[in-house]
Amino acid sequence: MTPAPARRPLLVDTTLREGEQFAAAHFSSEDKRRLALALDAFGVDYLEHTSPVASPGSERDLRMLTGLGLRARVVTHVRCQEDDVRRALGCGVDGVNLLFGTSALLRAASHGRGIDELLAEAQAAIRLARGAGVEVRFSCEDAFRTETADLLRIYTAVDAWGVDRVGVADTVGVATPQEVERLVSTVRAAVRCDIEFHGHNDGGCAVANAAAAFGAGATHLNVTVLGLGERNGIAPLSGLVARLYLTDPALVARYDLAALPALDRMVADMVGVPVPFNACITGETAFTHKAGLHTNAVLREPRSYEALDPAVFGRERQVLAGSRLTGRHAVAHRAARLGVPLSPEQVRRLTAEVKAAADAGALTDDELDARICAFARSLPDAPPSLPTAERTFHDSPPSNPR
Ligand code: HCA
Ligand code: CU
């Protein structure tokens, strides 16, 4: 008997909708085209674009995206208003992502409708979109501050009206993974349709919450490149991929994982922000090892201090040897890479020298190499073939075999 295929999440990239709500973001039509092609090549399952009613340019861009012939489904974010749904349908989308604020706070501050009223408007919008044969998602904005009884009433109603999926949105990033797990499980038990999760990062839990939602039965997970979005954003694509890969590489095997660094850089350049130094997978130092204890072990066995293999994601391991936290193994490794043979006693002395010098600030690779060469030349038995000029290199011990 062949084993049942693992359940895998579908990724809904909303960089071109939620991401454009990031304070510094303004994507040109050409940015959108390049980004959509790159995300499609990476393999995301859906691309969500801003509503065509947002501006004339947004409508033109949405038409341009639906005309690209992407493999990913192109969907747009739409208020539950029939005119808005018609405008979306006119752009040739594969689906509409309908939403309504359902918490008492949003009902009062945003649209002023009661549950009965919003359900009536949702029903009309759903009927119109279903009639056009596109995918329909209905999301409760601010689900985690909405009464559970109200949520279940809404979700079961829209499920009965034939939506393809319901959305559970942590709009202000207040939920914990445990709360996500509880709510998504409750919704899972109440509806037949698929479930989408959209989580903001105000409390630092966006990635953990998306992973928890998947664990509890969500089928579709929202991400943006770099986590761009309102305020401090939502779950970043690279972060969620890292989390899912650690759970089971099969969950993300169909995506072009080595394309992540270039994707993050592309969007960072478009928006004018750096890729965060501590971003999962794509951050500058995500695979950099520094302290002697770490470098010692990692040079022998990369898995000792690496949960993820950099090579899988198109990255390289960096082993720093020039800081005061360095260790003998890192220094010896650097010397060996320079072609400088040293005895264990000489390595010990050189390491002590490096540490003392680095107390004033870490040595650059060039400075460290110069120091190693000078040390070797000063030895009474210095071999004639010592390198005279410093060179730099990236450390890449064998990729870990995971
Ligand atoms: C918004 C709200 C939203 C919608 C999410 C969704 C949120 O900015 O319009 O459609 O599921 O966080 O609630 O992004
Ligand atoms: Cu949002």
Image (spheres, helix red, strand yellow):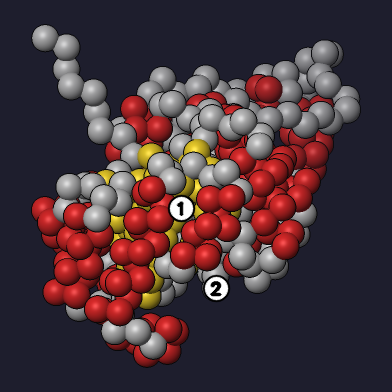
x and y, in percent, of residue 325 in the image: 56, 51
Q: Kindly identify the residue that appears in the image at 77 percent across and 54 percent down.
A: 28
For residue 318, the mark is none
Looking at the image, which is closer to me, 317 or 113? Answer: 113
Q: Amino acid at mark 1?
A: Val
| 326 left or right of 131 in image | right
Q: Decide if residue 217 is in sight here.
A: yes
x and y, in percent, of residue 212 in the image: 26, 53
Residue 8 lies, with reference to residue 173, above or below; the image says: above
| 76 left or right of 135 in image | right
Secondary element under disc 1, as helix, strand or loop, is strand
Which image quadrant for residue 360? bottom right
| Gap between marks 2 and 1 measured at Cα | 24 Å
Q: Kindly identify the residue that appears in the image at 53 percent across and 50 percent down.
A: 89
Q: Earlier in the sequence, mark 2 or mark 1?
A: 1
Q: Amino acid at mark 2?
A: Arg
Looking at the image, which is closer to me, 149 or 317? Answer: 149
Residue 175 lies, with reference to residue 217, above or below; the image says: below
x and y, in percent, of residue 345 in the image: 57, 30
Q: Quadrant of the N terminus?
A: top left
Q: Kindly identify the residue that appears in the image at 38 percent across and 24 percent down.
A: 402
Please give the residue where the numbered disc 1 appears in the rendered image.
96
Q: Decide if residue 352 is in sight here.
A: no
| 353 left or right of 306 in image | right
Looking at the image, which is closer to me, 127 or 274? Answer: 127
Please give the residue where the numbered disc 2 appears in the rendered image.
231
| 176 left or right of 363 in image | left
